[in-house]
Image (cartoon, rainbow, N blue to C red):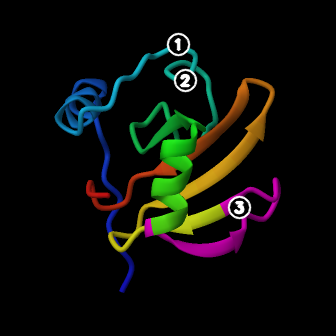
Amino acid sequence: MSAALAKYTHAAAAQQFRKAGVAWTSSGRCSKGHQVGKCSHWNGYKVDVHVIPRVDRYVTGRFRYTGRRPGDGAKTHKSPAGNVYAREVARSGTHWDITSVNGNR
């Protein structure tokens, strides 16, 4: 059985970050024309998080490593809720590209 995708509005995502005590900023560049497809930033299914030691330890220490993603070779981890964390190296900097599946960690 596959998990249902969890779509967030900008306000709902911001509320989740505040609730978890996570500081965040938004460049706005992901909201217009960034990655097409159903599971995109634009559609509310993805968020990018800067790579810092604390975030790296959290993701790699709590979530199962699931190999490299086809196409870009990003290392991926999957949370018990089914969310996918891909460590991307991009022009904009290294970050965790997170696809929300169940709206939980």
| Above or below: residue 27 compared with residue 70 | above
Circle 2 residues within 10 Å: few <14, some 14–19, many ≥20: some
Residue 87's x, y, as percent? 66, 50
Secondary structure type for disc 1: loop
Q: Is residue 84 visible?
A: yes
Of labels 3 and 2, earlier in sequence is 2
Q: In the rendering, which numbered label is found on residue 75? A: 3
Q: Quadrant of residue 92?
A: top right
The part of the chain drawn in magenta is 62-75
Q: Quadrant of the C terminus?
A: bottom left
Q: Quadrant of the N terminus?
A: bottom left
Between residue 47 and residue 62, name the one nearer to us.
Answer: 62
Circle 1 residues within 10 Å: few <14, some 14–19, many ≥20: few
Residue at the spot of label 1: 27
Spot the residue most to the bottom.
1
- Residue 80 as seen in the image, left or right of residue 103: right
At 73% from the left edge and 64% from the top edge, which residue is drawn?
Answer: 69
Closer to the observer: label 3 or label 2? 3
Amino acid at pointer 1:
Ser
Secondary structure type for disc 3: strand
Between residue 12 and residue 36, name the one nearer to us.
Answer: 12
Q: Quadrant of residue 34?
A: top right
Amino acid at pointer 2:
Cys
Residue 70's x, y, as percent? 78, 65
Magenta segment: does it hold 68?
yes
Between residue 53 and residue 17, name the one nearer to us.
Answer: 53
Of labels 1 and 3, earlier in sequence is 1
- Residue 35 as seen in the image, left or right of residue 84: right
Secondary structure type for disc 2: loop
Q: In the rendering, which numbered label is found on residue 30? A: 2
